[in-house]
Image (cartoon, rainbow, N blue to C red):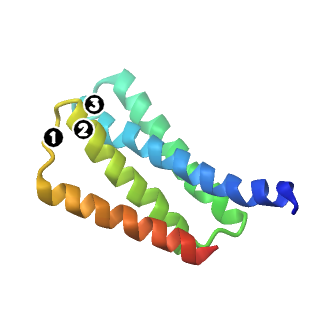
Amino acid sequence: MNIYSSEKKSLPWLIIVIGGFFQVGWSIGLNYTNGMTNILWDIIVLGSLLLSMLCLSIPMKSGIPIGAAYAVWIGLGVVLTILVSAVLGLETINFGMIIFMIVTISGVVGLKIVSD
């Protein structure tokens, strides 16, 4: 078993997951920019957006299928944004949201599995 090839294959997926976390920074940060007039939050939003996009595009260059990469990236970003928004008191999570977050995660995991 070649451990290096296994690590090489999982690194692009790790980068996509990191990109999902950066989505939280820009999506929630938009709430604090005051219409892109607060320079600190503007920088956080734009920096997070750039890093998030890079974390999507770089793995696709290594051969990750675009559909699976995008699904994992956006699905993770959506679920994490909802959860962090709830922790910060910006959003209330209801039962329906929980169900559809589970459906989203299931779809993302399924797409990741079938794309390997």
Considering only order in the chain, which callout, 2 or 3, is on the residue closer to the N terminus?
3
- Residue topped by disc 3: 33
Q: Residue at x 43, y 29 (%)?
A: 43
How many residues crowd around disc 2 within 10 Å: few (fewer than 14), some, or many (20 or more)? some
Question: Which of 96 and 21 lies nearest the eye of the viewer?
Answer: 96
- Residue topped by disc 2: 85
Return the x and y of residue 82 as percentages of the image width and height. Answer: 26, 46
- Residue 10: quadrant of the picture: bottom right
The amino acid beneath tag 1 is Glu
Q: Residue at x 21, y 38 (%)?
A: 86
As drawn, the residue found furthest toward the bottom would be 114
Q: Secondary structure at mark 2?
A: helix
Q: Secondary structure at mark 3?
A: loop
Q: Residue at x 47, y 66 (%)?
A: 109
Task: Please give left or right for residue 23 compared with residue 93 in the image.
Answer: right
Considering only order in the chain, which callout, 3 or 1, is on the residue closer to the N terminus?
3
What separation in Å lies between label 3 and label 2 (alpha carbons)? 15 Å
Counting the numbered discs, the total is 3
The amino acid beneath tag 3 is Thr
- Residue topped by disc 1: 91
Q: Nearer the viewer, mark 3 or mark 2?
A: 2
Q: Are marks 2 and 1 in contact (CB under 8 Å)?
A: yes
